[in-house]
Amino acid sequence: MKSIQEALKVMLPAFEPVGVERLPLSLALGRYAGENVFARSDLPSFSNSAMDGYAVRWRDIEGASETSPRLIPLQGMSKAGGEIPPPLRPGSGMRIFTGAMVPAGADAVVIQEHTRLLKDEQKVEFLHEVAEGANIRMRGSNLSAGATILQTGLGYGPGEIGLLAAQGYAQVTAYRRPRVAILSTGDELRDVAEPLLPGQIINSNVYALAAMVSEAGGEPEILPNAPDSLEVIVERLKEGARADCLLISGGVSVGDYDYVREAFERCDVRADFWKVRIKPGKPLTFGLQAHRPVVGLPGNPVSAMVTFEVFVRPCLRKMLGDSRPFRVTHQVELVHAHRHSPGRPELARAFVSMTKGDHFEAKLHAHQESGAMTSMVGTNALVLLNADDEHFPAGSKLPAILLRDQNGSSEPPFSLV
Ligand code: AMP
Ligand code: MG
C-alpha cells in the first residue's frame, strides 16, 4: 500500500500541460501563461498629469507663497485625449487636466487648489512653490517596454488582464484546459432525473466530480454510467482515452463486482498501485492508457471527493499550467477533543475559521464516515489526523488545507478604519 506522498510522486509526472492556445483576453481569467509575456510599451506611454492644474517650469515659481504669489501668463491648455500641446514657453504656465500630455519643457504640475486664476483668464497666480517632477506621471515610470510582465506558469487574474489590456494584448497564450472524462460504475446507479427502484441510488459522484474538475480549471465530460460489466467498462475505458485524463469512480476495490482491475488488464493499462494509505479512500488506482492518465477513485462519495482533492486536483492544476498546483498547509487548532481509530492517516472534514487571536480554529464534522455526504457540506477544510494517534485533545495543533481560497465573512473588512 502506498503512502499519500508516494502515490502523488508516481502520479504527478504523468500530468503535463496539454499544449497552449491563443485566446481572447476576456477569456483568460483563471488560465496560466503559456509563455513569458513582455511589456510592449512604456507605462505610462507618455508623460502625463496626475492632477488637474497648471504645467510649469518649477524654477519659474520657486519661492511662491500665499503672501508673495507668483503671477505667470497662461499659454493654452492640454486635456486628456486632446491635441499634442506645443512646448511650454519659459515663464509661462499651461492649463492641464488629469491624464493629459505634459508639454515639452514643463517639469511640474501645480494643483489647481494652489493657484488663483485672474479674471481675464490670461494669467494665473501661484500660491505655493512646487518640487521638480511633482504631479507628473513620467513616461515609463511604472514599467519599461521589454520588461517581463508575466512568467510562464503564472496566472491571469483581473490585475494581469487589466495590465495586458493596457499593453494592447487583445489575445494571450494560455495552457489548454485539460478535458477530463468521468466514468461511474455500478449496477445500482441511476441518473439524478431517473426514478429509483429499491436498492438503487442516484449517481451523485459524477456531479460532484464534474464540479471539482471545473473548479480545478478542467473541462469535465461525463460518460454514460457503466453497469458492473467487464465488457461495458472496457468499452468506456476506450471511450475515455479520447480525453486528456480519465477518472473512474467505483469498482476499483476487491469485491466480486469490482471490474476495473480486469478492465485495466484488457486495455493494457498498467496500474502503479491499487491502494493508498489514506482515510477516507483506501481503494485508489492510477495507470496510463496510451500515455493518458487514468485514475480510479473509490465509489464512496466522500472518499471519491477527498481523494480527488488530494491526488487529482494537484495533477489537474499542473496540467492547466499552474506552477504552484498544491494547496497551502495551515496549522489549525482543534476546538474540541476527537477520537480517531489508528491505522491510516485521516483527512477529517472540518469547518475552519480565523479567530480574533489571529489563528485558525477547526471544528470537525460529526459524521466522518466515507459515505456521509453531509460532511462535504458546510465544511471548508481537510484536517490531517496522524495515522498512529488515537486521542486528539482540544487545543491540538494540526495541519490542514483550506478548500476555499476565500472564506467569506458577514462583517466588512478593516473594521478599524
Ligand atoms: P464501490 O467502490 O463500487 O464498491 O462503491 C462503494 C460505495 O459507493 C457503494 O455503496 C456504492 O453504491 C457507492 N457508489 C459507487 N459509485 C457511486 C456513485 N457514482 N455515486 C454515488 N455513490 C456511489
Ligand atoms: Mg460498485
Image (spheres, rainbow, N blue to C red):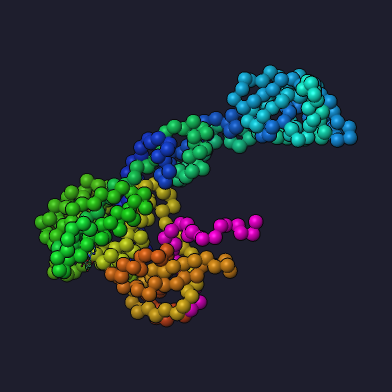
The picture quadrant where one finds residue 345 is bottom left
* Ligand 1 positioned in quadrant: bottom left
Residue at the (21%, 48%) spot, across then down: 241
Residue 268's place in the image compared with 302, above or below, is above
Please tell me in which quadrant of the rendered image residue 96 appears.
top right
Q: Residue at x 42, y 46 (%)?
A: 30
Residue 164 x, y percent position in the rendering: 49, 36
The segment highlighted magenta reads 394-417
Rendered residue at 14%/63% (across/down): 187
- Count the marks: 0
Does the rendering let one see residue 136? no
Task: Judge whether residue 401 can be spotted in this image.
Answer: yes
Residue found at the far right of this picture: 67
Q: Is residue 315 magenta?
A: no
Of residue 110 and residue 304, the one placed in the foreground of this image is: 110
Question: Dividing the image into 4 quarters, which one contains the C terminus?
Answer: bottom right
Residue 289 x, y percent position in the rendering: 21, 51
The answer to whether residue 77 is left or right of residue 264 is right
Is 286 left, or right, of 26 in this rendering? left
Instruction: Give left or right: position of 133 versus 340.
Output: right
Quick check: 393 left or right of 90? left
Q: Is residue 366 shown above or below 160?
A: below
Residue at the front extreme, as displayed: 119
In the rendered view, would you say 211 is above or below 255?
above
At horizontal 71% and vertical 25% (from top left) the residue drawn is 95
Q: Main secondary structure of the magenta part?
A: loop
User: Can residue 412 be found in the magenta stretch?
Assistant: yes
